[in-house]
């Protein structure tokens, strides 16, 4: 028992040190972080005629497609929920979470390679790079969610005070995406196959996550895959919040947050131990 307590205290201290270091880096280099986010935004839409309107068109198109195709054309219904728009809400909630997760880990997997020149020329804490990715990706996520809220408001399905549950759910989503992306980004410097294999892995991961199908259609012997899939747990929490007005399984959500904290500790140690070699490999 004393070993478990000692390990817990050690991990808690590491977690506290990690969070403190990341917050300190973010505050000290906030101008660099927010300047990079703004620069990314400007470069992305510099030569676009529609400019930032593209940010609005993409989420609007996604919501319209899911609503019109699945609710009106295919007349798909969610088992156990007779609502006309239940299946659209189910897919939209899952798709929004999955889009944010894949954008963060895909961009994080190449962040050290893409910023090689900057890393070699300027001394700055490398932990701010994934923070830039998380904030930049969150802008797209926020806009898509805003359109989703408008859609829910129009059909009269927008939850009320239950939306406060989004706070821990957002923490779980951001923390797991950040920790996974940071580990992949570090390893991808030394093993470039990781970046090449990631899109393939994500295709399998997508179909192992109940986004376009309800978990009830899976055979009992395969449901353990969803139970141990952190992204599936987060997706199901969002889906249950918007469909039922409550998160069905908080213990699994907090388990994902704890797992993310452990992965952040591993990522931090990995970056610290490999930093000198990492710069040489860039």
Image (cartoon, helix red, strand yellow):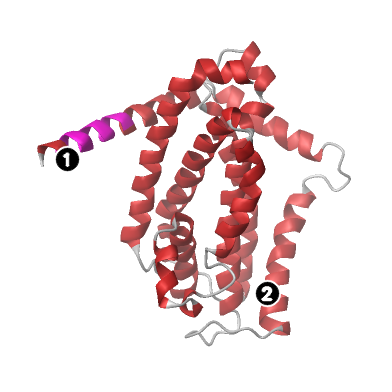
* Residue 113, above or below 176: above
SS of the residue under disc 2:
helix
Residue sitting at x 46%, y 46%: 176
Residue sitting at x 73%, y 50%: 55
Q: Report which quarter residue 90 is drawn in.
A: bottom right
SS majority, magenta:
helix
Q: Are marks 2 and 1 in contact (CB under 8 Å)?
A: no
Residue sitting at x 76%, y 34%: 42
User: Disc 2 marks which residue?
Assistant: 67
Q: Position of residue 275 (x, y in %)?
A: 50, 19
SS of the residue under disc 1:
helix
Q: Report which quarter residue 7 is drawn in.
A: top left
Instruction: Classify residue 205 as left or right of residue 15.
Output: right
The magenta stretch spans which residues?
4-14
User: Disc 1 marks which residue?
Assistant: 4
Q: Position of residue 160 (x, y in %)?
A: 45, 67
Q: Nearer the viewer, residue 97 or 120?
A: 120
Q: Position of residue 173 (x, y in %)?
A: 48, 50
Q: Magenta segment: does it hold 10?
A: yes
Q: How many marks?
A: 2
- Distance from the alpha carbon under mark 2 to that under mark 1: 50 Å
Q: Quadrant of the C terminus?
A: top right
* Residue 169, above or below 277: below
Answer few, some or many: residues within 10 Å of disc 2's Cα (few below 14, many 20 plus, some between 14 and 19).
many
Q: Nearer the viewer, residue 62 or 222?
A: 222
Q: Nearer the viewer, residue 99 or 199?
A: 199
Lower position in the chain sequence, tag 2 or tag 1: 1
Residue 244 appears in the figure = yes
Q: Residue furthest left?
A: 2
């Amino acid at each position: 028992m004393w070993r478990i307590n000692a390990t817990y205290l050690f991990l808690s201290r590491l977690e506290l040190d990690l969070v403190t270091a990341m917050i300190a880096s973010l505050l000290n280099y906030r101008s660099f972080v927010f300047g990079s986010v703004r620069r990314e935004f400007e470069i992305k839409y510099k030569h676009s005629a529609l400019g930032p309107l593209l940010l609005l068109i993409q989420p609007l198109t996604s919501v319209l497609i899911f609503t019109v195709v699945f609710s009106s054309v295919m007349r798909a219904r969610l088992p156990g929920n007779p609502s006309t728009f239940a299946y659209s809400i189910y897919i939209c909630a899952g798709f929004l979470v999955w889009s944010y997760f894949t954008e963060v880990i895909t961009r994080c997997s190449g962040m050290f390679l893409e910023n090689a020149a900057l890393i070699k020329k300027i001394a700055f804490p490398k932990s701010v790079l994934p923070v830039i990715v998380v904030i930049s990706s969150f802008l797209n996520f926020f806009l898509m969610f805003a359109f989703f809220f408008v859609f829910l408001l129009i059909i009269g399905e927008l939850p009320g005070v239950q939306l406060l549950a989004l706070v821990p759910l957002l923490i779980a989503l951001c923390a797991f995406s950040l920790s996974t992306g940071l580990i992949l980004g570090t390893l991808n410097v030394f093993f470039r196959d990781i970046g090449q294999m990631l899109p393939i892995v994500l295709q399998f991961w997508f179909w192992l996550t109940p986004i376009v199908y309800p978990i009830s259609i899976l055979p009992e012997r395969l449901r353990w895959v969803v139970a141990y899939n952190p992204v599936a747990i987060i997706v199901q929490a969002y889906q249950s919040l918007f469909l039922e007005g409550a998160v069905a399984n908080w213990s699994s959500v907090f388990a994902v947050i704890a797992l993310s904290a452990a992965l952040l500790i591993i990522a931090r140690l990995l970056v610290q131990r490999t930093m000198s070699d990492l710069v040489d490999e860039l």
